[in-house]
Every structure is written in C-alpha cells, then in structure tokens.
Image (cartoon, rainbow, N blue to C red):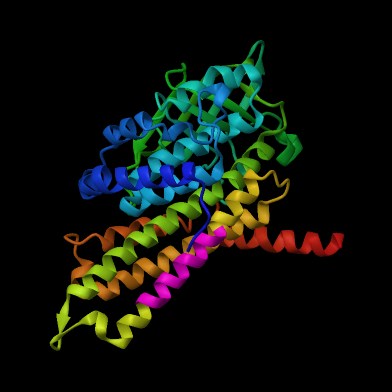
Amino acid sequence: MDYFLTEEQKMIRDLAREIAQDKIKPVAAKHDETGEFPWDTMKILADAGFFGLYIEEKYGGAGCGIFELVLATEELSRACGGIAVCYAGSALGTFPILLYGSEEQKQRYLPPLARGEKLAAFGLTEANAGSDAIAIETTAVRDGDSYILNGTKQWITNGGEAEIYTTVAMTDRSKGGRGASAFILEKGMEGFDFGKEENKMGIRATATRELVFQDCRVPKENLLGREGLGFVVAMKTLDQARPGVGAQAVGIAQGALDEALRYAHSRVQFGKPISSFQGVQFMLADMATQIEAARALVYAVSRMIDFGSKRFSKESAMAKLMASDVAMKVTTDAVQIFGGYGYMKDYPVEKMMRDAKITQIYEGTNQIQRSVIAGNLIKELAGA
C-alpha cells in the first residue's frame, strides 16, 4: 500500500532496508545461535544516524518522530527481530528522559544516545511485578542529596550492555501507585550490578539481564520529574513505545511471508510448485492481508502520536495487540508452508516464529493490552 511517505521517510525506510538485508540478515543466525550482542551492527546503525531519529535536533537528533522510528524498526526486524530489539530497546529507555527529563538531564544524556555512543534500557519489571507493575519492591530512600536504591529488576532488554538506565522504584509505599518515582542510573554506579544473562527462546541476539541494586546511591538530580510520578512516567513511556513493538511484529511477520512466498514458488510437489495449490495460496493471501492491516494500524497510531494527540493509550495498545497476534499467526503459517524444513534451524522461519512470541508478552502482555483497550472504551462511554 502507498502510505504517502515523504522523501525523507522513504530514504529512512530504504536505508534501513539496505542495512537489514546487507548487514543484518547474513549474521542473524549466528547471533541467534551464540547470543552474542551485535555491537558491530549497532555501530553501523549509529553511523547511519538511526539512534537519533526521534530525538530533537537541539540534542543531536534528527528531529523526526515515532513514525520514523517505526519505519526503521520494521525494516530491521524483517531481517532479525533480535538485533532490531537491541536498537528499539534503547529507544524504550530513552523515552522517559524525552518525556519527563529536565533541560539539564536532556542536555546531559540525550546527545550520546542520539549519536548511538551509548545505549539505554528501561527498568520496570520485577520477579513479582510483571503485569502488576504497582507491586514493584525496589525501593528508593532519600538520604541527603541522594537516593539509596535497593532491589532487583528482571528481564531487562539491553541489561548489562546499556550505559543509561531509566528505572522505577518505590519512594513511599504507603501511597500505593502514587508512591513510585523514576530515576536515571548509569552503568558503573556504586551498588549497581547485573545478574546472569538469560537463555531465551527468541530474540537471542539481545542481552536480557537482571538489574541489581544494593545500596546504590543515585544523585537527587537524577530523579525524573518529581517524587510520586514514577508510574505516570512508566505508563506514558509504554504508550509511546508500543507502536514500536507493533513495528517489530510487522517486520518479523513480513520477513516470514517473504521467505514463505519464495519457498512456495520453488518447492515442487506432485509435479507443481506448491504455490499453485489453493490451500497454500489461501494461506499466503491471509498472511499478506493480516500484515497489511497490522501495518496500517501501527502507522496510523504512530502518526497520531507525532501529530500531537493527547490521548492515545487505547490506540497504542491496539497497535501492539493486533500486530503481535498477526506476527505469531503469520510465522506459524510460514513454518507450516515450509513443512518439515520449516522446523529445522537450517531455514529462517523457525527463528522468526520464536522471535515473534515475545511481541505478545513484553511491554505489557496482550491480555493487559485488551484490559487497557476495554478500560478506555468504558471510560469513553461514561464520559459521553
């Protein structure tokens, strides 16, 4: 479909596609097998200016928006969902600073992030606080000109590799959800360490580790916004980031369709390419239609955010929900079209199926997305 991209947007998309196909696709299987973090690829993306796409020009970025970030993320994910997450995960960690950072904090942290010299990560999830984010146990206690953090964050994308971490901790548990605050932490701070790297089913190129705080002293200047704003920071961040997860999902699904279509055209059974059989044709048609519908929703929501809409939580959840469900369906069908070969690691679609699964889980499970959507629908009805 023609989404009426500007010339600049077409250049971003085409450059991301070129990097994905020429630099990422040839090494995707290796990184999936070894779990090695793709620093070489991050350097390529940094040199191409991709880390600054959504950051204002005065902080060293390109001054574009969420839509341009989505275009790049989709194309990178088309070649490797895991490597793309290393890139997109840094945006997730950067959003709290963009949204709630002071001018001094933005001047300090955004330029190296925009240049790709440093990666960011976002620390919210804990062992006992996944979907129930208000149950976080990490604490931050004011001590003079600092806060002392204690606790552990779990399953943090880019954990151990990133230099900058935006993290939520409880400053006053008696206030419940209004007792959390957000902080900017830096790798190397005393009392800040990392747990083991997780051995994951998919997106294995990215590092996923615990963040461990043991009497970690954080300067009060690193508080984001003000005390008690932590969950607002977290929820607004996720609203901004969920179209990016949708873009990952669309990219993974498109990559799987690309592979399935080529295979169906070349695989001969009963004397004919299997693409000539109606059963396979119908699968391909459904896959393509579902992907295009998901892409249209992700693009529309991204543009909605960039155009300054004040309320987009429902739509952001819809984009993530639909695209990730489509990714799981399409990659499963791609494996089916490949048949026995699809189950083998010699072919790329089994990896795509494994990578797709996480898009239904992280940044809010799809069950949580449905709750967010329904909750907003009911509020809108009550306010009508």
Question: Relative to 144, is 139 above or below?
Answer: below
Is residue 292 inside the magenta stretch? yes
Q: Quadrant of residue 158?
A: top left
Q: Residue at x 15, y 84 (%)?
A: 269
Q: Residue at x 32, y 86 (%)?
A: 279
Q: Is residue 51 left or right of residue 138?
A: left
Locate the C terminus by quadrant.
bottom right
The main secondary structure of the magenta stretch is helix
Is residue 129 inside the magenta stretch? no
Name, please, the residue furthest toward the left.
271
Report if residue 233 is visible in the image. Answer: yes
Name, please, the residue furthest toward the front.
7
Question: Relative to 321, is 281 above or below?
Answer: below
Picture coordinates of residue 31 (x, y %)? 24, 44
Between 13 and 239, the one nearer to me in the picture: 13
**Count of picture labels:** 0
Q: Is residue 199 left or right of residue 268?
A: right
Picture coordinates of residue 46 (x, y %)? 37, 30
Between 96 and 255, the one nearer to me in the picture: 255
Picture coordinates of residue 142 (x, y %)? 66, 19
Q: Which residues are magenta?
A: 284-297
